[in-house]
Image: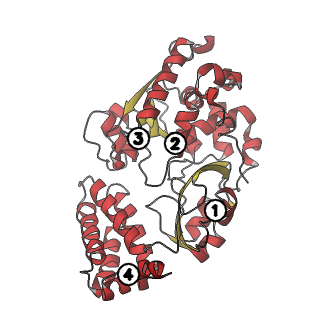
Amino acid sequence: MEVKILTEHYDKPEFQGLDGYKKHGGYETLAKALKLKPEEIKNQVKEAGLRGRGGAGFPTGVKWGFLPENGETRYLLCNADEGEPGTFKDRLMMERAPHQLIEGMLISAFAIHSPKSYIYIRGEYFESLRIVEKAIKEAYSAGLLGKNILGSGFSHDMDVYSGAGAYICGEETGMISSLEGKKGQPKLKPPFPAIEGYLGKPTIVNNVESLAAVKYIIRDGVQAYRKYGTEKSPGTKLFSVSGNVMKPGTYEVPLGYPLKDLIEVECGGLKPGRKLKAVIPGGSSAPVLTAEEAQRATMDYECLAQMGSMLGSGAVIVIDDSNCMVDLLHVIMHFYHHESCGQCTPCREGTGWLDKIVSGIHAGTGRLQDVQLIEQVSQHMMGRTICALSDAAAMPALSFVEKFREEFEFYVREGRSRVKEVVANA
């Protein structure tokens, strides 16, 4: 069942404003944190085992430890780009609890000795931008941002930057390029941003959910946080569930939670008369699971990796038996082709070829060898580009064809969808 740590007060409208946030203990943890040594905060976050909630799952405390100890100015960037199709949990967090994010960022900034941070918000999130900007103004007016915060001697400035809605700016080096006023294209790593990031200075990029979770680790302690989740995937996670369920939405459950319970208990199950066909567990870039695999899966990094998929951003897309997998892959491939920045040939050409091949099958002009060609093109795209967008297109393409090959071959032979035919005649 749901465990509401981050989302505890999300049903209270007053939680969005500063007064309402303070009414529920807001900024008390910041006051506590500012009395600690930065190293103590870093160690607690590391011991809690918090893993980046943006998709990669890299340990947050370990990432902070990569910053050089040379006294250089370092920046904290909050990744609120949230461009993965199917995910909308960061938007919920920014719009229901903007001060929770600001407080988490301030604690994190204090821990890494950062005097300046930016929240990079997805271009389409107009309402999130408005709410977060308002919250930052409130925090400045209350002395929670700026010089000598709460009389601690710690000073920090925070600003918001609205992207242009490009998917690739969710990748940390692409985001940094965009923030610097350049084309939002990823860079080769190393050097990693912790060494050479925004304006060439050491930079930490953390997701909205990761930064919000820092507050609760400092407030409640390491053991209280680790009592949820698994040994390697501790804590809770927000999952944004969409697709063919009765109650789509965002749910906070412990990591390691059974996927079937997330669908059947939290989301109210499938629509009447329908059967589960497949689930994409971590956003459209994650390899799809069959219904049988979904029954066995638990929502943590290790289990999904063992099943050949990934937790990703926590965007769960539920697919019932009324959906045609060729239709779905057609939409996904068009998206990744459109969003490729074109910098790397395997991505620029590969996403284009996948889109073209799947479009041909979808239009009824495909050939049987095109099904195998999808696999061949995908395999040549994996791991051969600067960032992971190429893999993000190749992984769903491979898994769709591997697990639902008969559906693709029927579409080629008959020039139409078998699933749509069955549904229409039911």
Lower sequence index among marks 3 and 4: 3
Q: Nearer the viewer, residue 110 or 7?
A: 7
What secondary structure is marked by label 2? helix
Q: Nearer the viewer, residue 29 or 165?
A: 165
What secondary structure is marked by label 4? helix
Whether residue 155 is visible here, answered yes or no, is no
Which amino acid type is shown beneath numbered disc 1? Ile
Q: Which residue does the image show at 60% across and 70% down from the upper left? A: 294
Q: CA distance from mark 1 to mark 3?
A: 37 Å
What number is the disc on residue 408?
Answer: 4
Residue 196 in the image: state x and y as whole percent.
37, 38
Which amino acid type is shown beneath numbered disc 2? Asp
Residue annotated with mark 1: 263
Q: CA distance from mark 3 to mark 4?
A: 42 Å
**In this figure, which colouring scheme has been used for the structure?**
secondary structure
Residue annotated with mark 2: 90
Which amino acid type is shown beneath numbered disc 4? Phe
Q: Nearer the viewer, residue 196 or 381?
A: 381
Q: Nearer the viewer, mark 3 or mark 4?
A: 4
Lower sequence index among marks 2 and 1: 2
Q: Nearer the viewer, residue 22 or 118?
A: 22
Side of 420 where 44 appears, left or right: right
